[in-house]
Amino acid sequence: MKISRSIIILAITAIFAISSAFGQKTRTIKVSELKDKIEGAWIGQMIGNIYGLPHENKYINAPGPENWPYGYTKNIEKLKKYNGAFSDDDTDVEYMYLLQMQKFGPEPSYAQLRDAWMYHIRDRVWLANRGALGLMHFGYTPPFTGSKNLNPHWYQIDPQLINEVWAFTAPGMVNYAASKSEWAARITSDEWGVEPTIHYGAMYSAAFFEKDIRKLISIGLEYLPKDCRYANTVHEMIALHEKYPTQWTAAWKEMAQKYYVNEPDMTKTIWNANLNGACAILALLYGEGDFQRTLDLACAMGFDADNQAATLAGLMGVINGMKGLPENLYLPIEGWKEPFNNNYVNITRYDLPDDKISDIVENTLKATIDLVVSKGGKVTGKRGNEVLTINTGAIFNPPLEFCLGPLPRLEIGLPAEFEFYTAANKIYNWSLVSGKVPDGMTFEKGKLSGTPQKPGYFDLTLQLDNGKDKITRDFRLLVRGKNIAPSADTIFANVRQLNESVLDSCWFTFGKSMYAKNVDVINDGVLSGPGSVFYSLAAKTKIPKIDYFGYGWDVPQKISMLAFHTGCLEEFGGWLTSLNVQYLDEKGKWQPVIQTLIDPPLPETDIVFYQPHFVEYTISFPTIETRAIRIIGDTKIEGHWNKYTKNVSGFTSITELSVYH
């Protein structure tokens, strides 16, 4: 492959920049300058978010028109209404994270952030964020909440717009900022879905000491995995800029063709993390360091444009400091004397307080200094002229904690391997301090392996230590009998075929290859991925319905447990609000199974934000003997803004229904 001269030069420049600037063991910055740049980060993000909102998801088939500056347009009235900046998902989660840093210190744990999500975030989240929230309510912690096997939106834009705060509280600590940004990104996302967040994290941290856009992009590349998808994308955007140095629309066309039009079906959305990250790189390159031009380009690049606008405006705020931001953008209302009238008004998150922007900045400054000092830095100088010395080689080690996700699927006679997980497995020691692993299995260094021999529940207590601290947690493992669903002679279902014409009229958010065409997939053993999910979507009607799924055998079977595995869910439905079991009696009539225990229980509410993708509910009961068994429940229809979806009947999303002796 031919490599362009500019890429070679850029690579050499990157090496030089890192070795000469960020290879230093310490750097210093005046606290007053640090505060100015932190204020620039917050105000920049507020500018970009509010400025960009009218352009969100607006330019898909072509970029936005070049009638710049766009201005705040209709959001001027909202700024007047709230008499200041108002919250949106580009700033409100970061503000929530800042409050957790104030409460728990500069390195809150996954569990602490999960608690904040579940308490403060009750609506107004979509895609990977909504998927993560549902899994949190199910009982999982990050990074499982962002795992591609559980959160089918793992590749979407979400993490790159809510995690900048981890980087601009780590000035000059580029390695630390990149690692911590990735750690936080995995709350909602996985694999290449987290890569733009890593890149932004490194650039934000480096921008406290580096103003050149090209160098910042190069520095960010050094903290991405070599030859990862987003690193290659960034290099391609640099090459497009070289190819069309004055024609940003031509570069946009080639970028959109590759990363949107030709994107594989399973990840083709206008919110794709790689696609929107590519838009941001083009906006940075063609913006040439000019705040207003970069802001307008971020909007004009389209797709999920307000997020690029907010993140890039925040980055420019760090580069230029508050003093370098255009006054007309933070004082857009006549009579305002302070940036956004010094008001940040929460309109999006439950029980997050309104705040003075100056207080947000002061609290961020304190968290930053606390973090820097905890990592070997120090504050010197007289009051009013303090200097912060930064240990640029600081490393982020995640807090010691158990990460909770799906426990192993253990079945008699089937070999299994399972690793209990933490955010930093490699530096932790595991111990079994009480209890007994299933017969036929062993536990060593966090890994369970072997072939279970006996069904039932097995309780054990595990310990983690990092050489300094120790923590313990109880786990209950389930060993199941043999799954007899694959041996069924009949599959029972009230809807056997997906009505694709109805699906096409819905606001569905996954690639069509995700959806199976008929119900036969529910006993094939495949729990996720293309063709794994059956939607019982049959008609276009406002009437809710009852769904059932089950099996029949030619000879009676002894059954004591079912396992219902959900598929991916839509904003308007896909989940059951009740779940019961019925069996076929000797007279051929369906009868209720009594004394059923659902583990875990169904969500406490039927609203969408509590519903988890790709999870399993086990339903146990006293053993019955029957030729047929099924689950049955009420489907949910959620109100939705899409006018077509409003008339679609309820349905169930299912990947698997297992049956055990």
Image: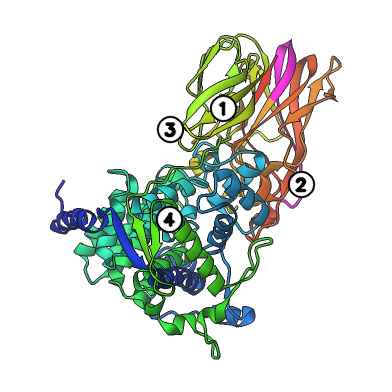
Three-letter code for the amino acid on which mark 4 is drawn: Val
Whichever of labels 4 and 3 marks the residue nearer the N terminus, that label is 4
Q: CA distance from mark 2 to mark 1?
A: 48 Å
Residue on which disc 2 sits: 544
Residue on which disc 1 sits: 463
Three-letter code for the amino acid on which mark 2 is drawn: Pro
Three-letter code for the amino acid on which mark 3 is drawn: Ile
Q: Residues within 10 Å of mark 1 (few under 14, many from 20)?
A: some
Q: Quadrant of residue 640?
A: bottom right
Camera-near label (4 vs 1) is 4
Q: CA distance from mark 4 to mark 2?
A: 58 Å
Q: Residues within 10 Å of mark 4 (few under 14, many from 20)?
A: some
Q: Which residues are magenta?
A: 540-562
Residue on which disc 4 sits: 373
Residue on which disc 3 sits: 427
Q: Position of residue 15 (x, y in %)?
A: 20, 53
Label 3 sits on a secondary structure element that is: helix
> Can you see residue 471?
yes
Q: In the visual, does 496 lie left or right of 303?
A: right
**Residue 547 is a magenta residue:** yes
Three-letter code for the amino acid on which mark 1 is drawn: Gln
Whichever of labels 4 and 1 marks the residue nearer the N terminus, that label is 4
Q: CA distance from mark 4 to mark 1?
A: 30 Å
